[in-house]
């Protein structure tokens, strides 16, 4: 009897200690610096510029006669800002626009180019003054690889095949001769080609089975010229449509497809009421971040299907459209998709990039939608004026991850709960640069609480640490044309380094990049 009583008392004590320690949870990050994974492709940090709203016209391109300072028609402020970001690739011309774009309308003397109506986006006149040459000269100036999406929805196999010949063939052929006549002697040797866009919807309303067959026809005549081996990207699923992935993986031979696209937008409300980009409370903020975090689920579930057909992960998941989609700014053209960008968008970017990094074995490319003045833009313009958004600063902060080796980590994080939502307060990815520097990006999404994080750098003898931070007074702080630097990057020093470990006081609502040597 006595013995039983003694035993229960001990269990009670143990139980008490377990509960106590769970409440006083230590936030800990173990980074295995000696166990590197795959390379985090720099192409995960790609962007997307569609003929939509003031993205191309007024954003990237103003034309050589504009009084906005420009170089050969490209606005200088925007071009220099994009160049400084060292973006690895730029996707063009759409989006939905790609499947109604006929490339021959956008070559030759600009004055002779036909006009069309951009029926998808605002019903405005498209004068085709920004075409193939203007796009490819732009990507050259900013040092990015072009990623071109062909027209499957309203185009033809011949049209796409000839576009590739026009751009890539180095010899005598009708299309190569036409390119030379239009002033470009050398082929551009473009690697990345998308075979249509959202072919389940605006790209032709096809079934997965029909598209898989179409893909094979288009891909067959998408030729490699010379040493340039094309990287062909199949139009993939609408977010959670796993059947689309299953059908494509089953029907398209692995040697005909290099990438499979998936589009995922973080829509906070419904498609009818997407809610305001700037006017939101903390509960809505967490709803947005919880939805953004579903990227992880998409990678795991589409990836599991792909693994069955492609266990060596040859075919990459290409998130060639991702980001936030809110209601347009009041008073702006609903077809132009112009939205402001707050610290909340910075968190969506930081978390998404961490997720892509952590799945670098399968995610080979991603393109934020979209570059200038559209959706989760990195740059906003107002006539001659320009601002960098919080999202721009995240891409700048995360630069060290590009082409670095992914490091495995184990994170223990406390939760943050607001309204009906609960999620982990911390979100992390880590990598090792070629010179051995360990890069750790940390987002503390808790809007109110600083978190003390113990970082254990397994297999490393750290000597020095530098860190940068993005934060702002409020979760809905943003950069406006009147106050351009409300959200920006600053030096961060609130950490202590000792032996193998590093203690970081991660401020509430902040994103940090720590670099350890
Ligand atoms: O990025 C805006 C649009 O969203 C794209 O044109 C389309 O592909 C997607 O539905």
Image (cartoon, helix red, strand yellow):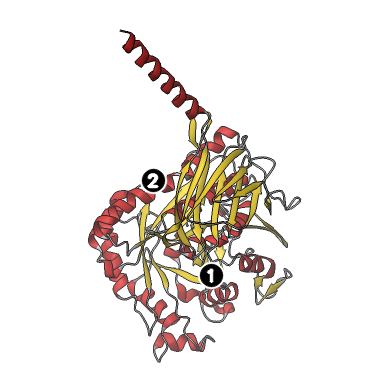
Q: Which residue is mark 2?
A: 297
* 35 displayed left or right of 472: left
Foreground of the two, 397 or 133 = 397
C-alpha distance separating marks 1 and 2? 43 Å
SS at badge 2: helix
**Of marks 1 and 2, the one in the foreground:** 2
Query: Quick check: can you spot residue 46?
Result: no
In x, y percent, where is residue 384?
73, 62
Residue 68: x, y in percent?
72, 68
Residues packed near mark 1 inside 10 Å, few (<14), some (14 to 19) or many (20 plus): few
Q: Residue at x 31, y 76 (%)?
A: 221
Tag of residue 487: none
In which quadrant of the rendered image does the N terminus lie?
A: top left
Q: Which residue is mark 1?
A: 115
| Dot 2 beta carbon under 8 Å from ligand 1 | no
Across and down, in percent, residue 174 comes to: 40, 87
The x and y percentages for residue 512 are: 60, 50
**Residue 289 visible somewhere in the drawing:** yes
Crowd rating for badge 2 (residues with CA inside 10 Å; few <14, some 14–19, many 20+): few
Q: Secondary structure at mark 1?
A: loop
Looking at this view, is 487 or 369 the one in front?
487
Depicted 293 relative to depicted 62: above or below:
above
């Amino acid at each position: 009897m006595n013995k039983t009583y003694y035993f229960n008392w001990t269990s009670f004590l143990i139980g008490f200690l377990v509960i106590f320690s769970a409440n006083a949870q230590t936030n800990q990050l173990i980074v295995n610096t000696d166990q590197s994974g795959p390379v985090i492709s720099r192409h995960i940090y790609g962007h997307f510029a569609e003929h939509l709203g003031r993205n191309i016209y007024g954003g990237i391109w103003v034309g050589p006669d504009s009084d906005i300072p420009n170089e050969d028609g490209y606005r200088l402020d925007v071009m220099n800002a994009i160049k400084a970001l060292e973006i690895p690739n730029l996707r063009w011309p759409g989006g939905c626009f790609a499947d109604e774009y006929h490339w021959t309308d956008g070559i030759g003397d600009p004055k002779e180019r036909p006009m069309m109506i951009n029926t998808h986006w605002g019903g405005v006149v498209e004068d085709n003054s920004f075409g193939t040459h203007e796009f490819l000269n732009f990507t050259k100036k900013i040092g990015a690889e072009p990623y071109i999406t062909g027209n499957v929805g309203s185009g033809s196999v011949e049209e796409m095949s000839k576009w590739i010949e026009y751009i890539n063939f180095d010899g005598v052929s009708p299309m190569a001769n036409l390119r030379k006549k239009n002033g470009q002697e050398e082929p551009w040797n473009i690697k990345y080609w998308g075979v249509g866009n959202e072919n389940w919807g605006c790209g032709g309303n096809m079934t997965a089975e029909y598209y898989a067959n179409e893909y094979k026809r288009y891909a067959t005549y998408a030729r490699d010229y010379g040493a340039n081996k094309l990287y062909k990207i199949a139009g993939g699923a609408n977010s959670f449509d796993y059947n689309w992935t299953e059908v494509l993986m089953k029907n398209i031979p692995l040697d005909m497809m290099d990438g499979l696209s998936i589009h995922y937008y973080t829509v906070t409300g419904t498609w009818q009421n997407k809610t305001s980009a700037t006017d939101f409370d903390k509960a809505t903020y967490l709803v947005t971040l919880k939805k953004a975090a579903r990227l992880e689920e998409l990678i795991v579930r589409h990836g599991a299907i792909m693994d069955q057909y492609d266990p060596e992960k040859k075919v990459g998941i290409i998130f060639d459209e991702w980001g936030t989609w809110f209601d347009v700014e009041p008073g702006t053209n609903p077809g132009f998709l112009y939205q402001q960008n707050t610290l909340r968008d910075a968190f969506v970017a930081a978390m998404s990039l961490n997720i892509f990094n952590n799945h670098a074995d399968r995610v080979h490319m991603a393109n934020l939608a979209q570059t200038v003045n559209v959706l989760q833009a990195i740059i906003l313009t107002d006539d001659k004026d320009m601002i960098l958004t919080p999202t721009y600063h995240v891409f700048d902060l995360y630069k060290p991850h590009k082409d670095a080796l992914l490091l495995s980590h184990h994170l223990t994080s406390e939760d943050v709960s607001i309204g009906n939502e609960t999620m982990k307060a911390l979100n992390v990815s880590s990598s090792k640069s070629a010179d051995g520097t360990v890069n750790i990006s940390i987002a503390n999404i808790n809007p109110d609480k600083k978190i003390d994080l113990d970082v254990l750098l397994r297999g490393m003898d750290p000597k020095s640490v530098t860190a940068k931070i993005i934060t702002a007074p409020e979760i809905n702080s943003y950069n406006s044309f009147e106050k351009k630097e409300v959200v920006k990057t600053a030096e961060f020093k609130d950490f202590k380094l000792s032996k193998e470990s590093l203690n970081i006081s991660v401020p509430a609502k902040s994103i940090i990049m720590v670099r350890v040597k």
